Amino acid sequence: MSEHTDRAVEEQPFVWPTVRKVAPGAPWRWIALGLADMKAAPGASLFYGTVFALMGAAIDFFVGVAALELALVTGFLLVGPFLAIGLYDVSRHRTRGKTVVFSHTLVAWQGNAPAIGFYALILALLLAVWIRVSVVVVALFFTGDLPGEGGVLAQLAATPEGWVFMAAYVAAGSGFALLVFGTSAVSVPMLLDRYSMDTLTAMITSFKALRANFPTMLVWGASIVVLVGVGIATWYVGLIVTVPLVAHGSWHAYRDCVEPVAPAS
């Protein structure tokens, strides 16, 4: 199918996307398919993974306030869906049986720039709110900054007050994480895949996919948190592999959860 034909299919009159039920074990298949995409396009995949790892390392190196660093690192999960567009494009080309062109992945967002740009603005606002909430939660438990020597988590886990703080922080973060996951689980790949798709429709469809497959999508969300967490815990080096794996898997989650656009007759 040519690029011209692809665009013709994607620019059909609007039809509300149909959400499908997926098998409970689908997340493991998405990870396997993501790994296959990485193996098929290692250069592009590892490039984006390296960019994510460098971003994490830059936060660690340049941000001197531990509370702000914690907010930015955890906020990493909030903006990740938008930053992974190039990786979705790799999987999109693979799904369509096309050759992956690295330069195309860098500008893949241009196909639906208004909608993708609007979603990026929403994520930026959510990140700004999360940073403020994160700093406030820290201020409620500490008179100064977070302990920074010997590892923040190790010091927090050594005291009852630290456990209470971590419970409060996770509770606050979980609300933001569920909101972002609900609106982005399939929306960003859909905005990339369908040039006529608007932001709000994609977000609503993503919520519908989450509701229709709630246990399965919770497993998928937990898998994302674990994989990204492992990447961060390895001084961000692990993100070189785990971020592409999550992004490619997210593309296949979208393909499974939403009926494809029917070809024009």
Image (cartoon, rainbow, N blue to C red):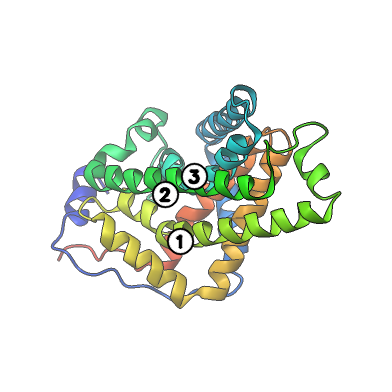
N-terminal of the pair, mark 1 or mark 3, is 3
Q: Let me know if residue 23 appears in the view.
A: no
Disc 3 is placed on an element classified as helix
Above or below for 245 versus 31: above
Direction from residue 48 to residue 116 in the image, left or right:
left
| Badge number at residue 126 | 2
Q: To which residue does mark 1 refer?
A: 179
Q: Residue at x 24, y 70 (%)?
A: 16
| Residue type beneath disc 3 | Arg
Q: To which residue does mark 3 refer?
A: 132
Quarter of the figure with residue 73: top right
Of marks 1 and 3, the one in the foreground = 3
| Residue type beneath disc 1 | Leu
Nearest the eye: 125 or 238: 125
Direction from residue 213 to residue 162 in the image, left or right:
right
Nearest the eye: 79 or 63: 63
Nearest the eye: 227 or 146: 146
Above or below for 155 versus 101: below
In space, the residues marked 1 and 3 are separated at their CA atoms by 17 Å
